[in-house]
Image (spheres, helix red, strand yellow):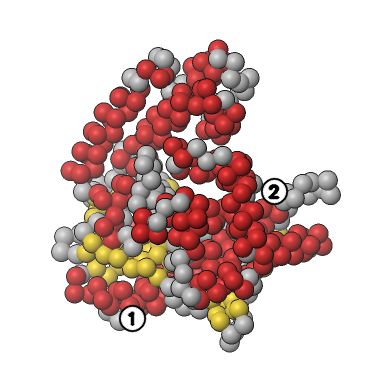
Amino acid sequence: MKSWNAARLFDEIVMPAQMELIRMEYRGVRVDETLRSRRRDEFESRIETLKADPVLEGVNPWSPIQVLNKLKAWKATRARSADERALKKIRARRPDVANFITHVLECRKARKLKSTYMDAKTHNDGRLRTSYKLFTVETGRGRSGKDVFDLGTNMQNFPASQRDWIVPDPGKVFWAADASQIEARVVAWLAQDDAYVQAFLDERDVHTEHAVAMFDVPESGVRDLVPGSERSYRDSGKLVTHSWGYWISPYGLAARINDTIPDLAYSDRDASKHLRALDKLRPGVVRWRLNLIEHLKTNRTLVTPFGRPRTFLAISRASDSLPSPLHREAVAHLPQSTAGDHMHRALVTTAAAFRTLNVRAECLLYTHDEIAGQCLPEELNNVRNIVTEAIGLPMPLKYGSNALICPADFGSGGSWKEAHP
C-alpha cells in the first residue's frame, strides 16, 4: 500500500476537502426563522433578568472597568484585566466573590450566545452560511466563521441547544454522523497502550467509564444534562479524557470542568486526583509523552501518520518544568491533526460517493468530528451506509495487526439537533 507523505496528503485529502467545503459554504443551511426569533426574544428577556439580579449590585457585567472596580473595592484583585480567564482565577482564589463573578460570566455568555448565533445574519435567500478554512490552524483542522460579506457565523462550534432551528429543505430530512471517540482512539494507538487499545477493541465507551468514575453517576444517567449546564455527564467525561490526553495541568482541568459545570465545585485537588488515576490506568500514554520529549530534544519536526509535517518553534529551556508549553503543544498536535485529516478524507469520500452513485443527498455542515447534511427520506439508508463507511476507513495506524478503525454514530431527524447521534 502506498505510504502517506505531505504531497499525497495535499493532493488526495487537503485540496479535495477544501473544494467540498467551498461547495458547502455556497449552499448554506435553511433556518427556521420563527423558532429563531422566538429564541432570540427569550434570550433578550433572560439577559435583562440576569442584568437586574441584586448579586451584581448595579454593576454592568459587560463593563470591564466597572467589574474591576467592584472587585478592587472588595480587595479581591489588583489585576488590570477582567477577561474570562482573569475572573476565573480570582473566583478560584476568593470564594467570597464567587457568586458575583459567576453571574458576570453568565451574563457575558448569554449575550455572546445571542449575538453570535441568534443574531447571525443570513443572505438574501434566507440561508445561513459559514466560511471554512483549512490553512489557518497548525494542526490542519478546519476553522469556520463569517464569510467575506460579514454574514453567517462559526458553525463548527454551534451550540447543541440552538441546533433545533437549523432545518432541512422542504421534503428532506437532516442527517448527521460523527466519529466515535476519535481523538481518544488516536491517542491509544499512537501510545500503543495495551489496556487503552483493548478498551476500544472491546467497543467500550471510555468517556462514559470516566464520567461514571468521576461524577458517581450510574451508567444509565451519564447522558443526562448536568443541572445548570448544556452538557451531559458524558460530555464532561469526554472533556477529561481529551484534556488528560493533551497533558493538561490540574488547574487547567479544574477550570474547564468548572466552566462546563459551575455548580460542581470541582477543585484542583479533584483534578489532580483524576489525572493521576488516568496516568496509572494508561501507562503507555505516559511513556509516549516521555518519548516525544526525548524526540524534541534533537528534532523539532513531527510527522503525523498521514504524512503532515510540523516543526515546533517554541522556546524550550532545560530549566522548564515538565511538561512545558512546547511539550503540551506537541502532544496535542498529533491526535488532533490525525483525526482532522481522517475526517477531511471522510468528507471527500462521502461527497464523491453521493455523486458517483447518484444519491440524492448533500453535505451541508462539517465540524471537527462530524459531517451533517440533508437527503430525501427514501435515500436515508444509502446515506447512512456511505457516511459510516467513509468514517470507518482504516487510518494509517496499527496496534499489532489491528488497524485503527473509528466507528461512526449516525442519526437523522427534522433538525440538526434531532439528527445529532
Residue, disc 2 = 325
Identity, as a three-letter code, of the amino acid under mark 2: Pro
Residue appearing at x 41%, y 35% in the figure:
109
Point out which mark residue 356 bears: 1
The location of residue 65, given as percent across then percent down, is: 52, 18
Q: Nearest to the eye among marks 2 and 1: give it.
A: 2
Query: Above or below — where is 228 with respect to 80?
Result: below
Above or below 84: residue 374? below
**Neighbours of disc 2 within 10 Å: few (<14), some (14-19), many (20+):** some
User: Does residue 222 appear anywhere in the picture?
Assistant: yes
Q: Residue at x 28, y 61 (%)?
A: 419
Residue found farthest to the right = 318
* Secondary element type, mark 2: helix
Give percent across and percent down for residue 192.
64, 72
Disc 1 element: helix
Q: Taking 226 as reference, is 44 left or right? A: left
- Near-viewer residue (411 or 253): 253
